[in-house]
Image (spheres, helix red, strand yellow):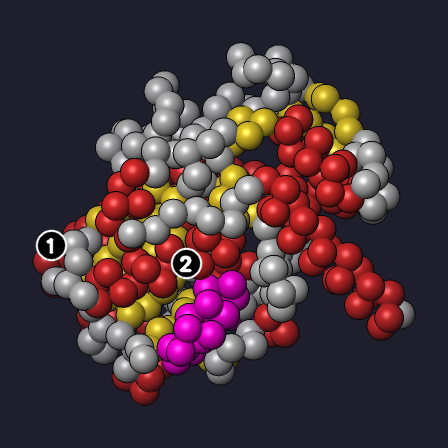
Amino acid sequence: MSRFLITGGAGYIGSHTAKLLATSGHDIVVFDNLSRGHRDLVRWGPLIEGDIRDTALLREALRWFRPDAVIHFAAIAYVGESVARPDLYYDNNTAGTLSLLRAMKEAPCSNLIVSSTCATYGQPARMPITEETPQLPLNPYGQSKLMMEIMCADFAAAFGLHYMALRYFNACGCDPDGETGERHDPEPHLIPRALMAADGEIDRLDVFGGDYPTPDGTCVRDYIHVSDLAAAHMAGALHLMDGGASGALNLGTGRGISVKEIIDAAERVTGKPVPHRVSARRAGDPAVLVAATNKANAVLDWKARHSDIDNILATAWAWHRQERNQTKRRL
Ligand SMILES: NC(=O)c1ccc[n+]([C@@H]2O[C@H](COP(=O)([O-])OP(=O)(O)OC[C@H]3O[C@@H](n4cnc5c(N)ncnc54)[C@H](O)[C@@H]3O)[C@@H](O)[C@H]2O)c1
């Protein structure tokens, strides 16, 4: 049994990882300021309510709990917001990670998994994207995550930190048991919005661009189920604790799915039409983003097993309906 401190464990991906670690027999503590997370999603270990920029509190938490590794999800992650308020992103994501790195150095705790993103690659010319593809982010959110990776590499070289930066592609789906799920406000992600449109909660889904050089003209992305992400985090942490090398890995499926294919799957799974309208392209949206996954498959002995598109939509739909039914019961 090992011990893990999970920053951002009250959020979407963090709560799924907390569940997997706890149900696999590990001890977890969540460290979250609840700025974008939810107290009721902290179900698999105690919550320390605190901000990662509070280095002293983090150091105290690390000295008290003595985790074998920290898994760091805490961040804000809206691309549009990051363009309007870069100050928030560099403060929360970049300075927040520096604060965590300092606290870990002082505690000490030397194993760290961090949430990075395909947004650090920007708009690469060649697919699939490998870990060696140049990282040229197009917005402050991607920059804030690239800076986080750079700091981890520098702390590894100078102070012996062991780290793994996991670059997720499109996180989606929900816990198959319905014990946690995706709850963002506002909700910018395609799949929950497609389900909101199917359910009549929004008038229609906006599809940004129908004239991309892709088979059906809509953007193609690599959708990875959150249960697969959780499994990769556990494998990554155990890899570092076993003395495995530090570095960065892509987490995706290697398979591209278009927006149109997501809409078709949402209609199939819900049995309802998804009203949508094709509008102009959004600035900075590449036509295709697909991960090369062989490095993660080999290093972590891990493969995406839950990321079949109908399974993604079915688990997301079950969570959506459960959440709405609970809201109705409360009213
Ligand atoms: N959702 C995706 O598709 C996706 C893709 C790539 C990378 N990521 C990264 O994965 C991580 C988790 O994303 P998510 O979708 O679960 O987000 P989320 O908003 O659901 O969870 C983030 C959690 O971090 C907490 N948090 C934020 N700032 C904090 C701070 N200063 N101190 C303490 N807690 C803080 C929030 O309260 C929230 O509980 C983020 O780092 C994000 O950048 C997400």
- Provide residue 94's location: percent of width, then percent of height: 36, 53
Q: Quarter-wise, where is residue 22 in the image? A: bottom left
- Provide residue 305's location: percent of width, then percent of height: 46, 49
Q: Is residue 27 magenta?
A: yes
- Provide residue 179's location: percent of width, then percent of height: 62, 68
Where is 144 relative to 64, above or below? above
Residue 172 numbered tag: none
Type of amino acid under label 1: Ala
Q: Is residue 133 magenta?
A: no
The answer to whether residue 112 is left or right of residue 35 is left
Where is 91 relative to 5, above or below? above
x 52%, y 39%: residue: 223
Type of amino acid under label 2: Ala
Which residue has dot 1 on it? 157
Q: Quarter-wise, where is residue 61 in the image? A: bottom left
Residues in magenta, as a range: 15-34
Q: Is residue 73 visible?
A: yes
* Furthest residue toward bottom: 64
Q: Quadrant of the C terminus?
A: bottom right
Q: Secondary structure at mark 1?
A: helix
The answer to whether residue 172 is left or right of residue 322 is left
- Answer yes or no: disc 1 within 8 Å of ligand 1: no
Q: State the separation of the CA atoms marked 2 and 1.
A: 27 Å
Q: Secondary structure at mark 2?
A: helix
> Which is more foreground, mark 2 or mark 1?
2
Residue 231 numbered tag: 2
The disc, 2 or 1, on the residue closer to the chain's N-terminal end is: 1
- Residue placed most toward the observer, 292 or 83: 292
x 41%, y 34%: residue: 254
